[in-house]
Each structure stands twice: as structure tokens, then as C-alpha cells.
Amino acid sequence: MRNQLFATTTIVLCASAALAHAETPATEEVRTLGFVEVFGNWGVNFGQTEFIPDGAPGHSKYPFASGFGGGAAVGIVVLPSWLSIFVDYRYGSTRTVTGELTGALSDVHGELSYHSFTAGVRIERPAWRGAAYAQMAAGALLPFHQTIEFEYAPMLAAVGITGEGTRRDHFGAARGVEAEMGYHFDLPSRFYVGTGIRVATFQASNNGRDTKLDNFVLDFTALPPVAVTRNIHFSKHGGPNMPTTYSVQDIRLNVSVGYRF
């Protein structure tokens, strides 16, 4: 009887061990090698922009600029569960509020768009049903331009100014950094959705670049005002027009969809 009980116990223990060994691979967390991600965002821009005319001559208002953007990122896990390196591409655009100048402009606004490439590190920490994350990256904006557009009021037709006028300021590549923090909510099949706040600052200059005026009035106080079409070149190597710097600074709410592989 004792031998039968010992044999039965041995068989049960061996079967349990075999079952546990067989189940182990299925219950282990699948290793993550990296991620791919696409994102969209909306935010405000704090670059250098002139105030917008607001009705009567001499009156102006803050050129609040906002817009949408998007991009994609690819990352590789360096230290499992918490540290990755990544590269990303981002497109951004902003447009100021519109204004007017009584008797001269029926509409005036500014626009800016850019493309950036950055590389950096991302830290993630599991929390609730996903992971909190923070990231920092450095890189550059490709050469870009800022545009100011005028729509002339019908009254200016008396002095030969009609239609639209534009001023396009061109800048070289801008160097800078951006940071983001937020939360990734896990979905089935290794997908996730996330939301975060992204802050970026980049600086460029117009050295070696042009400002292009097309039917653009520089001085509305002149009698009569004159619309100008010409290029103004800026260079640090002599010449009448000294270059200036320009910064692109924005804060954006970022929404992302990603996949861990």
C-alpha cells in the first residue's frame, strides 16, 4: 500500500512539473525589440511675429498662432521595459489670427510651416493599463519660410494697389531640441494609443537667404502708399542688409498610435 501511494505521488509530482514547464513559455512576457508610431498634434507657436493690424490705424492685436501637424517615429529598445532610442519626422504648420486695417487691408495674417528630423531617447515606466513616458530629442528643421499675406481693400484701387500682397521671409536650417511627456494606453495585439504634451524650440537665421516681396506695401503712412515687388538678400559677408535670427517655439498636444514589435 505504501509503495502504491509513493508511486502515485511521484507520478502526480512529475506530471505537475511537466505541465508547469510546458506552460512557462506561454505565460512569459513577449520581449519587445522596438516600436513604430504615427502621431498628429495641435498647438500654438511662439516664434517672432509682428502684431496684426486691428481696425483703425495704430491699433493692433496679439498674433496668436495655432495649427496642426503630424509625423512618425521608429524606436529600438536598448534596456528592456524602460529605455529606447528613436528617430522621428515631424511636419508642423501655424497660422495667426486675421486682422484688418481700415481703408487699406480687408485681411492680413501670417503663416508658417516646417519639416523637422530629430533623434533622442525615450523612458517608459509601466503604470495602470499602459506606461507613462518621457522623451528628449535633438535635431533640425529643414530650411523654411514665414509668409505674411495682405488682401487690399477696394479703396486702394484709387492709387493702383489691388489684389493680394505677400512677404515671404526665408530661413536656413534651424537647430534645436524638443521634449515630450505623456501616457501610452495598451491595446490588444501589441498596439497602443497615447497622448502627451510636446514642447520644442529651434533657432535659425536668414544669413544667405532672401526676403521676397510681391505687390507688398511696406509703409501705409506714405502718401501715396506704394506696392513693392523685389528680393532683399541678407549676408554676413558685407552688403547693406545684415542677417537676423528667427526662432520657432511651440507647445502641442500630441496624439499617437503605435505598435511594439
Image (tube, rainbow, N blue to C red):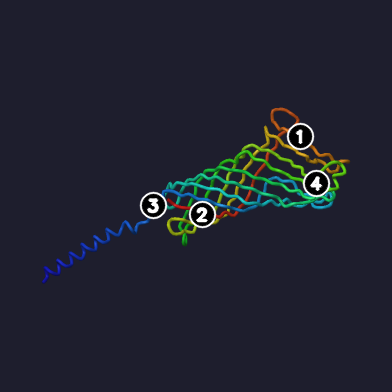
- Sequence-first disc among 4 and 1: 4
Q: CA distance from mark 1 to mark 2?
A: 46 Å
Judged by depth in the image, the label closer to the viewer, 2 or 3, is 2
Mark 3 surroundings within 10 Å by alpha-carbon count, few (fewer than 14), some (14 through 19), many (20 or more): few
Q: CA distance from mark 3 to mark 4?
A: 62 Å
- Sequence-first disc among 1 and 2: 1
| Residue under pointer 4 | 152
Q: Are marks 3 and 1 in contact (CB under 8 Å)?
A: no
| Residue under pointer 2 | 257
Q: Position of residue 178 (x, y in %)?
A: 57, 47
Q: Please name the amino acid that badge 4 sits on.
A: Tyr
Between 72 and 175, the one lying in front of the other is 72
Report whether 157 appears left or right of 66. Answer: right
Mark 2 surroundings within 10 Å by alpha-carbon count, few (fewer than 14), some (14 through 19), many (20 or more): some
- Sequence-first disc among 2 and 4: 4
Question: Is 5 located above or below residue 211 in the figure?
Answer: below
Q: Which mark is residue 52?
A: none
Does dot 2 land on a helix, a strand or a loop?
strand
Q: Are marks 3 and 4 in contact (CB under 8 Å)?
A: no
Q: Are marks 2 and 4 in contact (CB under 8 Å)?
A: no
For image coordinates 80% across by 40% down, the residue present is 218
Q: CA distance from mark 2 to mark 4?
A: 44 Å
Report whether 253 appears left or right of 55. Answer: left
Mark 1 surroundings within 10 Å by alpha-carbon count, few (fewer than 14), some (14 through 19), many (20 or more): few
| Residue under pointer 3 | 31
- Sequence-first disc among 2 and 3: 3
| Residue under pointer 1 | 230
